[in-house]
């Protein structure tokens, strides 16, 4: 059952409180000298005190306000709740950008109702931009967002955080088959690129190896702006994996078909 407008407003307001708390924890560390740990894996996966402090303060506020809710966070894993509602947190999406002083990162906050993410926030405290999304629409700092029409891959701007995220030769070849047809390809961006898609500046994002906390907050923002985000085979994107997002649903259908054949 869909949440009422009043429920959406309540949870969005609380998500904004979480964003404020995370911002206060993060900002002293940005463009400052700090230790960086590597969580390991195929690619360099950095984590800093800023990531950990921001998630900790958000978890504390959720426990105090909604003790029955669950929490899934990048740094501290899953805490099951008695409610079907779960907050999904990525304190700094784009830590590689963060540690190099680039403002292409953000705090991601989603509320999943047990079926799908229904509220999403991407907060960029350094630039002062806050993106909010739900089935009622999407906004940045009060201005409503709308994706742009783009019916052809040949006229599309495509983004991807890094080509290194494609962890098999087949996925790498599939990405190249799509990106080679686009008008413009840009790398970098992490969550910021998805918000640019919702804002009408980017047409396509094709990525892989994502986690649920990387995408759940972005789904309501993109869908609320009129876009579509799924896995490469057109399934729900909420569990991460190989993801394609488009501002124009007709372009999304074309790319999913191309990826199906490329795979």
Image (spheres, helix red, strand yellow):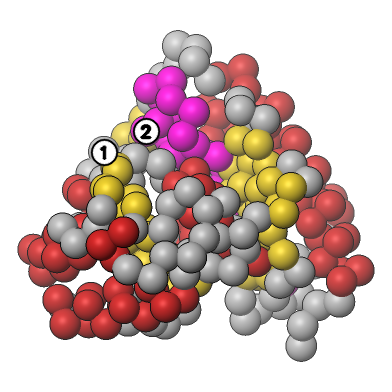
Q: Quadrant of the N terminus?
A: bottom right
Residue at the extreme top of the image, as rendered: 33
Crowding at mark 1 (Cα within 10 Å: few <14, some 14-19, many 20+): few
Q: Position of residue 13 (x, y in %)?
A: 84, 52
Residue at the extreme right of the image, as rendered: 6
Q: At 29% across and 42% down in the image, what residue appears?
A: 187
Q: At 11% across and 69% down in the image, what residue appears?
A: 170
Residue range corresponding to the magenta coloring:
85-106
- Front residue of 117/206: it is 206
* Residue 156 vertical position relative to residue 92 in the rendered view, above or below: below
Q: Which mark is residue 107?
A: none
Query: Is 18 placed left or right of 181 in the picture?
Result: right
Q: Position of residue 242 (x, y in %)?
A: 32, 67
Q: At 37% across and 60% down in the image, what residue appears?
A: 204
Q: Which mark is residue 96?
A: 2
* Residue 40 vertical position relative to residue 257 in the rendered view, above or below: above
Element class at badge 2: helix
């Amino acid at each position: 059952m869909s949440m009422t407008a009043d429920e959406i407003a309540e949870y969005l307001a609380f998500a904004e409180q979480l964003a404020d708390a995370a911002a206060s924890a993060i900002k002293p560390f940005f463009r400052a000298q700090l230790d960086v740990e590597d969580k390991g894996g195929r690619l360099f996966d950095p984590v800093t005190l800023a990531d950990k402090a921001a998630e900790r303060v958000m978890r504390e506020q959720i426990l105090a306000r909604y003790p029955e809710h669950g929490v899934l966070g990048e740094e501290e894993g899953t805490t099951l709740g008695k409610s079907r509602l779960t907050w999904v947190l990525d304190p700094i999406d784009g830590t590689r950008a963060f540690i190099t002083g680039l403002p292409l990162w953000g705090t991601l906050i989603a509320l999943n109702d047990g079926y799908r993410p229904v509220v999403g926030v991407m907060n960029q405290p350094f630039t002062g931009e806050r993106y909010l999304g739900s089935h009622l629409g999407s906004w940045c700092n009060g201005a409503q967002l709308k994706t742009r029409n783009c019916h052809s891959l040949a006229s599309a701007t495509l983004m991807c955080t890094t080509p290194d995220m494609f962890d098999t030769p087949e996925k790498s070849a599939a990405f190249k088959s799509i990106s080679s047809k686009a008008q413009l390809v840009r790398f970098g961006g992490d969550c910021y690129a998805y918000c640019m898609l919702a804002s009408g500046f980017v047409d396509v994002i094709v990525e892989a190896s994502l986690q649920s906390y990387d995408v759940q907050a972005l789904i309501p923002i993109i869908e609320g702006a009129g876009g579509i985000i799924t896995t490469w085979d057109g399934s729900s994107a909420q569990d991460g994996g190989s993801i394609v997002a488009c501002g124009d649903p007709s372009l999304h259908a074309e790319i999913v078909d191309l990826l199906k054949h490329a795979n």
